[in-house]
Structure formats: structure tokens, C-alpha cells
Amino acid sequence: MLKNYFKILWRKLLSDKVNSLIHIGGLAVGICAALIILIYVNFEKSYDADLKYSDQLYRINLTSLSSDGSIEKSARTSPAMGETFAKEIASVEDFSRVVILGEVIAGFEEQFVREENIFLTDQQYFEFFDVDLLKGDFDQMNEPLKAMLSKSTADKIFGDINAVGKTLEINSTNFDGTVDFQVVGIYNSTPANQHLKPEILISYATLHHFIGKEIDQSFDWLNQFSFLKLSPGASISETELAINESLQTHYGESLKSSESNWDLSLQPVHDIHTNFAITGEYEKGVDGNKLSYFLWIGAFVMLMVYLNSINISNAKAMTRAREIGIRKVFGGDRIQIFFQFIFESFLLNLFASVVASLLVLSCGDLLNSILNLGLPESIFQFKSFSNYVLAFWVFGTLLSGIYPAVILASFSPAGALKGTLKFKLKSAFARPLLVTQLVFCLVIIAGVLTVYKQLNFMRDQNLGLNLEDKLVFRSPMLFVDGSGNYQEQIQNSIGSLNSVKNIGATNEIPGNEVYWRSDEYHVEGKEKNGVMYTSLSVGEGYFDVFGIKMLAGRAFNLALEQGSEAIINRKALTTLGFQNPEEAIGKQLESRNAKIPIVAVVDDYRQQGVNVEIDPMVLNYSPQDLNYYVVDITGSDPASTLKEIERIFKKSYISSPFEYYFLDEHFDKQYKSEQQFVQLFGMASLVAVLIAVMGILGVTNQLIIQRNKELSIRKILGATPFQLLNLISGEYLVWLSICFVAGIPFSYYILSGWLEGFQVQVSLGLWFFLLPAMTILLMFLIATCYQTAKAVFVNPADILNDE
């Protein structure tokens, strides 16, 4: 029986190759697009979900409310919190502290590397984050000046030498020079789906070695991540209440005196990567709301795919009425006919699922690169998406097979053979399905336009600083190339080039978050107000190289020592209580026990993208070496200027690599999430348009096949091609009008909701929806004209010769 079903299906496919290709091809392309989206979303949501204690691990986040009403949510907390809460709260089993050390130069003998992913942490970290130890002993990480390396870093520094027991030299500004560490272990590199990816781990006791153990009792040194392991089944709300009560007990008086209000919350570790609302993160993750939109995009694509499949299956089914009538006359029953159509749907969806899987396996890495998804290569293996393929196969089989199977199995043999069936499947079902499919197509095309325009709108905003023609290169490796005032050397050498207009140094370039923050700043004679200020060290030429507008005051006095003067931005001017820039000049800015005069006020500028609020900022002058140098290039030949800068750098700093990039490209990377959204939306749009065209071609082709004799008779009686076109498409144009009436408000509702997540938003003009509507109308007219033309130019005698 199954063999006969297969033969019938194969003959049907070969006899109608165009519709068969449309049917299977539409399913395959749609499933492929949906698989890419699902693989991406599933990977992004898998961060830290596989940890042994994933359901028990929480990070403490700090929400600070200042006296002026400003609110900041930060991932950075203080050393005393974890230890205090673990001792006092029953639901807290254990804690771990992580301090991001920042950029260092690490090496052994003559081999040194620049490393940014370096943490100070305690022994509990290894248990919390499932560190896979290859060599060494975790217990030694309780002692100061001990380090562990990832296998990749150990290979870069030590090569084939066993690193355990060797001395690792680490040069860092935080250490004020070079410090020797004993390597006590090597661990497997962290999986790609963990939000913390350390390459070097330093024992937390090292902090005690440099600062003293009293740092552990500090509530106001907000420069670390605090993780809590809760008891299984512990109430999160009750634990949050308990940690806030403990905070008030130990630090409430200090908060009250500074007019600050802190609120601690617990964030599941597996939610960190998909939360975009927290500052101070080690690494920006993805916006969880956008992942939900990706799922909606995938759902829309698959709905279009299945609506297309149902339409074509139903249209084909009407051409097989006589076949079913003959089978019934020869003894076929309803059950056999029903299962025949289910089996055909089963095989068609199997073919499509196989083709889609092959497309993902063969093109997955290419799409990953083109769409800049950042997925690991290993994810494009069949086992990683086999469950989705199975689900699409089963769901598609039932969705596109059951309805025509039920209808055809119920046909009267006599009515089918005489051609007197009254049920008009195409009128009752095909048109609404096609129109629904086109509504989804309209939403997706309108979405592409909106996302593209929003991204460009964000890029075109005034940043308060000039990023064009700015070359950035990293500071030389301090340890390798010796000590000295690199800033002065670089100013004198590279800064003297004719094609270099300005050169400035900074610890963080625009596009990077500044992690050093403090709520200690206040004006002499006034109390602290709890506002978090960003503190940035800059060098000579910083304001000139970016063209930052100075509202009042003067530039730094380069003859003074580091940290002798402060320049604030307009936002800090307001939060410090000044009425105008001139009023702030000469006032003393206090922080802990230090007092420094404010010598200038600059206009607000965006350290980060336009979707991040501008922070109150305090800029300090540093004549010492800083992390980045920014060069303002002039002239018509930037390529030769770049070569000359590289030549000078390599001549002066022989052992240091010349690492450079252009600042506007780097700044644009902040919009990676939006860029991915545009690219995935673009892919979905192409698939949606392809499927919509296939759907129109498939349905109109089947409609013309069903009405071929009618069209031939009308043609003999003198009907013009335009009249035949109107006959075929006239009713559909009415349904298209319904599509536009329903689709445009639906699109506006969805897209305006997406735009609410941005601080600056593009206005949704009418053309955002008229252009997709005109695109769909044009696709429909082209497809129906093509199909009608084929019918018009067929000799009527060829159609009517069997009557």
C-alpha cells in the first residue's frame, strides 16, 4: 500500500514540476530561515544555563537612587556584601567575588602577550562556574600571588613547557609595575556560552597583599561582582528583603548621611547575558527583548510557509476529485484515502526538512559570518537542531495534510465523476489564507524598513564629539619595552607629523564603557548626593583631538602632577548643584580625602552610543602612559600617514605589536544588536517575499488549471487578455485591500512597541507602510499577469479537445 502511495506521489510531482518545486522549495527555504533564527536565539539564551548550580546562582545588582531622583542599575557591588550575607542569611549557602583587573601584559622569559580577560577571584568561583582543571590544584588559589591560566593562554606564553610551577610576570597599572605570580593550574578554555570568559585567574588573596584584608569589610568600594549560591528552593523575594535589611544594618547610616538610597536585587546568572539594562557589565550581552522579536520573525516566516503549503495542497486537491471518485468506485474507503493524503504530506514535508537541514549544514557558517551572529562553528551540527527539524516535519505534515485529506475522503464518487461537486475550496479557504500570508509579509517588510531607518537614525545623531578620521592604536607593552613617559615620546614623534592634526591619550576611548565609577564626588562644603560619577583619566590633547566643546575654563596645566585638576561635563555640573559653567570654575571637588579644583566645564558628549544615557563625568589629567592613543589624521592620503605612524611605532617599540583601528568603525560596534536585527530581519524579509511570490504563483496556477476550460471558452467568445486577467485577479484585489487595511495597523502596533526600547526614535511615517503595500501589490500583479499570459497564449483547442 505504501509503495503505491509513493508511486502516486512521485508521478504527481513529476507531472506538475513547477508547483512541486514551489511547494517543496518554499517549505525548505522557510524552515532553513526559521532554523537559523532558532539556533541563534537558543544559543544566546543558553548562557550559563548548563552550569551545575545554574538554578541556585544569583548575582547581586545595585540600584542607586540619588537625592536628585536619578537612578542607576549596576552590576558592580562591594566586597563586604557577599561575605556578610552568607554569614547572616540562612538561604545563602556560599558566595564568590570577582574583580576585573583590566588590561595587563603577561609573559614568561621573552614571550609576552597583552591580555584583557583577567580576573581576581576566590576559590568558590571554580565551583560556581564549573572550571575544568587540566593541571594543578585549586587549593593553592587561597594564597596571594597565585595564578591559573586557560589552556589557550598557557600555549601562547609557555608553548610546550608545563606552565604549572613556573613564574608568570604580569605588568599592570593596577600593580604600579610588574609582579611575579606562580602558576598553580591550567584549565580548559571557558565555553562560548558563559558570560565570564577569563584567560587568567589571579587569587583573590592577592588583593589583600596589596591593599590589606580590611578591603573585605568595605561597603563603598563598588568595583566587583558578587555572586551568591542560594539553598535549593529558596525564596528569591524573601532573600532580597533579607539582604537589603542586612545592608541597612551595616551601612544604612552612611547611606543616610550621603542622602543615597541603595536597593539590592538578585539576578539569576543565566539571565545576565540577555539583560541590557544593567551598567558595569564585564561584557555586553544581547537584548532579551530583541530575542523575543527574533522568535516572532521566525513565527511569521513559518506561518507564511505553512499557509503557502496549505493553499497549494488544497488547490491541488481540487484537481484530484475524479481520481478519488474512481478509487472509491473500485472499493477504496475513506480511511485509505485519508491516509494516502497524510502520507503524501508526510513525504513532502520530509523532503523539505531534509533540504532545509542540508542548507543549514552547508551554509550555516557562511550565514553566521555574513549576518555577524558570533555563533561557534560547532553549533551547526545536526544534533544541535534535530529536534526543531522533527517538530517542523510533524507539524507541517499535520497542518498541510489533514484538511485536504478530510475533504477529499468525504467526496461523493458520483459527484466527483460527474463534476457536480458544489463545495468551492478555493473560495472558502484559499483566498483568506493567501491574504493572511501577505499580511505577515507586509509586517516583515515594514519591519525591515523601520529597523534599518532606526539604525541609521541612531548613527546620525550628534555625539558631541568628532569620530571621523580618528586612528586609534594601543599603548606599547610597558614591561617589554621598558618604562618611561610614553605619552611624551608619542606626542613628540607621531604628534609632530605634518599629516597629524592632533593626538590625545585616554584610558577608555569612545565606544567603550568607563568602569571606574564613584558616588564620593561632591563640592567642598556640600554633602554627597549619591550620584554615581564616571571617572576618566585622559592625557594631553584629548579635548582637541575630539573637538569637544569647552563651555568655561581652561585646559589642564600639563606642568602639574597627575590628578591635580578636574574637568567636568555639563551633566556633572547639574548634579553637583551649579547653576552655570562659570560658577563651577575654581571650586574644590572632594572625593574621600582628596580635594582638586575644577578648572573647566565641557559640553556633554557620548562616551557610548545614543541608546545609553550620558553620565555625569569627572575627567582627570594623567601625564603617564594610558591605554589608548587617538590620532586626528588630516590630508588626502590617510593610508600613507598610517604607514608612517606604524613605522615610527615599530622603530620605537620593537617588541610591541602595532594594534590599530579607526574609531568610527569601533564606535559603530555598539550597535551590533541593532545590526544583527537588521540582518536577520533582512534575511527573513527575503524569505518572506520569496514565499509570498511562491504562494501567489502556486495558488493562481492551480486556479487557472481549474478554470482552463472556462478561460478557453471565454477566449473563443472574444474575451481580451485584460478581461481574463480581471477574471482571475479581480476578487484577489479586494482581498488585498483587506490585507492592507488589516496589515498596516498591525505593523504599526508591533513596530511602535519595538521602538519604545530606544531613547531616540525614528518617526514612523506613512511611507514605512505604503512602500511594503505597494511592493506586495506589485508582486501580485506581476505573478498573476505571468500566469494569465501563459493561459491566454495556449491554443483553446488543446484544452477543449477532450470534451
Image: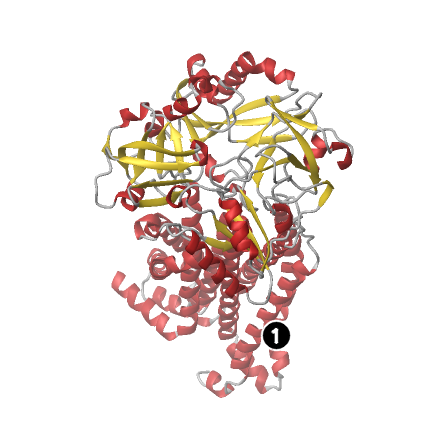
Classify 409 as above or below 573.
below
Task: Judge by depth and name the residue closer to the eye, 573 or 750.
Answer: 573
Classify 14 as above or below 283.
below
* Residue at 27 percent of width and 45 percent of height: 155
Task: Judge by depth and name the residue closer to the eye, 242 or 604.
Answer: 604
Report the residue marked by disc 1: 727
Q: Is residue 270 left or right of residue 490?
A: left
Image quadrant containing the N terminus: bottom left
Task: Judge by depth and name the residue closer to the eye, 513 or 775.
Answer: 513
Please state the horizontal and vertical placement of residue 169, each as a whole percent of the image: 33, 37
Residue 408 in view (yes/no): no
Count of all numbered marks drawn on residues in the image: 1
Q: Residue 165's quadrant in the figure? A: top left
Please state the horizontal and vertical placement of residue 600, each as a whole percent of the image: 70, 38
* Residue at 51 percent of width and 86 percent of height: 796
Please state the horizontal and vertical placement of residue 182, each as a whole percent of the image: 29, 31
* Residue at 37 percent of width and 75 percent of height: 15
Q: Is residue 185 left or right of residue 550?
A: left
Residue 559 in view (yes/no): yes
**Tag 1's secondary structure?**
helix
Q: Residue 332's quadrant in the figure? A: bottom left
* Residue at 36 percent of width and 69 percent of height: 326
Q: Amino acid at mark 1?
A: Leu
